[in-house]
């Protein structure tokens, strides 16, 4: 008797199978690449043929030996350099710059209705895709709740164009650890992040965010920063190691990772002791922090460019701090390169207005001594590895998703050409060019 319902279900299921299935054969596209930087290899290859079936890359081969499948659409990029779709691993699609003249950070939350913020995020993701960024790890909505989950659904549902999104929803900080702040204490102000105090609240916030669709959890491990007595950068720590451990433990249990905003000092060291998977910004990495990151395999997403915008006047405390942040950051970046940390491309777009070019970060990295190929891999295969999408994203190779871009000129000779993307394909669909 017990097995009867199962047998019945099986019979129903079998009868539902059509007698003859004629699957639609997926569209085949062939790209002729003049030069291919595949995201993984140390050197470019010339005259390559990329065969794409549906949304996946089937093969990559020398033009001399390649055959074009019958009925394939051919895209001629023989005068261009072809690369994998780029990945920006630190963005805020719900932020629109923090220009003090436009009300700074607070205006994003106080003045903009949620629908306006969603409309602007829709434009932001479109702009990212236009610039060849086919994947974003968006590290919190800055008071727009779970809006990033909605934008991701809109992209995946085909309602709006945009990159693949890895979202982290609300982010987590502590009392005294996030904006809005500086208002009368009697006022209950909205906060740009979910505020927790104690390991129980911390774990609960992580559970809530994961439950509502967070792909990553974002934690603020430092908040305010200022110039210390000895001219050093001091950062206010936020979560304790115990609070962070509860979040990391919970998030890892869900098979997901934790990105930690950390500038320097106590908060940075708590971030590492608590097991953060990536350090965001890491303005002042001391030798102990670098050694611990190497040992733990921590990713480093420096986001250099954003610390060169909106400086206070030179003779003010804020202005001095802003300049110090940039100068110690440069030193940390160079030390991280020398030590062989896993550096991943991230911009903090949103902190930078979305009207500005995303590729400016490449210039800054190369300017600080990074080899152009290394900078490209930080935004392709290395970022994909951080996202646990090795071989699927950030590479032009068999089996990878067909996220492909092209630029004129040679980015290995002049990294600036990455700022002028001429062709964008995401998921086998041409979004821009040809
Ligand atoms: Zn950020």
Image (cartoon, helix red, strand yellow):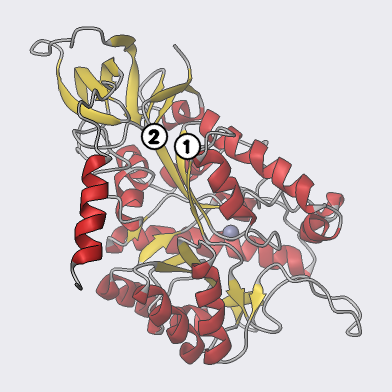
Q: Quadrant of residue 172?
A: bottom right
List x then y, in percent, for residue 307: 61, 56
Please determine whether, in this image, residue 286 is positioned above or below residue 157. Answer: below
Determine the secondary structure under disc 1. strand
- x 70%, y 46%: residue: 118
Instruction: Name the residue at 70% across, 59% down.
Output: 144
Query: For mark 1, what is the residue?
Result: 133
Instruction: Name the image quarter holding the N terminus.
Output: bottom left
Q: Is residue 96 left or right of 292 when viewed as pictured?
A: right
Label 2, label 1: how many angstroms apart (C-alpha)?
6 Å
* Circle 2/circle 1 CB separation < 8 Å: yes
Q: Residue at x 58, y 39 (%)?
A: 125
Q: Nearer the viewer, residue 408 or 74?
A: 74
Q: Of the numbered discs in the image, which one, if any, rests on residue 75?
A: none
In the image: residue 92, left or right of residue 275: right
Instruction: Choose top left, top right, bottom left or bottom right for residue 340.
Output: bottom left
| Residue 170 coordinates in the image, percent (x, y) | 61, 66
To which residue does mark 2 refer? 85
x then y, percent, for residue 293: 33, 72
Residue at 66% from the left image edge and 36% from the top image edge: 123
Drawn side of residue 366 relative to residue 106, left or right: left
Q: Position of residue 431 (x, y in %)?
A: 48, 23
Disc 2 element: loop
Where ligand 1 lies, by quadrant? Answer: bottom right
């Amino acid at each position: 008797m017990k097995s009867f319902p199962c047998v019945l279900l099986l019979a129903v299921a079998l009868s539902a199978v059509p007698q003859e299935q004629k699957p639609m054969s997926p569209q085949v596209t062939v790209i002729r690449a003049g030069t291919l930087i595949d995201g993984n290899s140390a050197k470019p290859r010339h005259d390559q043929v990329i065969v794409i079936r549906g949304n996946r890359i089937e093969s990559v081969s020398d033009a001399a030996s390649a055959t074009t499948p019958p009925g394939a659409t051919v895209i001629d990029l023989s005068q261009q350099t072809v690369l994998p779709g780029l990945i920006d691993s630190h963005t805020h699609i719900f932020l629109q710059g923090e220009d003090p003249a436009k009300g700074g950070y607070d205006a994003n939350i106080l003045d903009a209705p949620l629908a306006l913020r969603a409309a602007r995020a829709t434009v932001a993701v479109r702009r990212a895709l236009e610039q060849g960024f086919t994947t974003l790890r968006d590290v919190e909505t800055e008071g727009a709740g779970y809006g990033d989950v909605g934008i991701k659904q809109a992209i995946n549902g085909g309602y709006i164009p945009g990159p693949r999104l890895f979202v982290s929803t609300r982010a987590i900080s502590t009392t005294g650890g996030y904006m809005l702040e500086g208002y009368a204490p009697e006022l209950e102000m909205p906060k740009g992040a979910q505020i927790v105090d104690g390991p129980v609240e911390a774990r609960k916030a992580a559970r809530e965010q994961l439950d509502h669709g967070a792909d990553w959890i974002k934690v603020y491990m430092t908040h305010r920063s200022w110039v210390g007595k000895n001219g050093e950068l001091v950062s206010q720590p936020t979560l304790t190691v115990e609070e962070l451990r509860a979040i990391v433990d919970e998030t890892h249990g869900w098979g997901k990772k934790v990105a930690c905003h950390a500038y320097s000092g106590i908060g940075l060291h708590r971030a590492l002791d608590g097991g953060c998977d990536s350090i965001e910004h890491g303005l002042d990495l001391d030798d102990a922090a670098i050694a611990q990151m190497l040992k733990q395999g921590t990713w480093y997403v420096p986001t250099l460019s954003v610390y060169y915008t909106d400086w206070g006047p030179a003779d003010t405390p804020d202005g001095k701090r802003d300049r110090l942040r940039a100068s110690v950051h440069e030193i940390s970046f160079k030390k991280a390169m020398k030590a062989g940390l896993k550096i991943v491309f991230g911009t903090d777009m949103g902190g930078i207005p979305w009207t500005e070019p995303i590729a400016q970060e490449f210039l800054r990295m190369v300017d600080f001594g990074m080899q152009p190929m290394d900078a490209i891999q930080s935004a392709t295969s290395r970022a994909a590895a951080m996202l646990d999408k090795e071989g699927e994203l950030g590479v032009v190779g068999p089996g990878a998703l067909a996220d492909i871009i092209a630029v004129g000129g040679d980015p290995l000779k002049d990294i600036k050409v990455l700022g002028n993307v001429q062709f964008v394909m995401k998921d086998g669909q041409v979004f821009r060019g040809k």
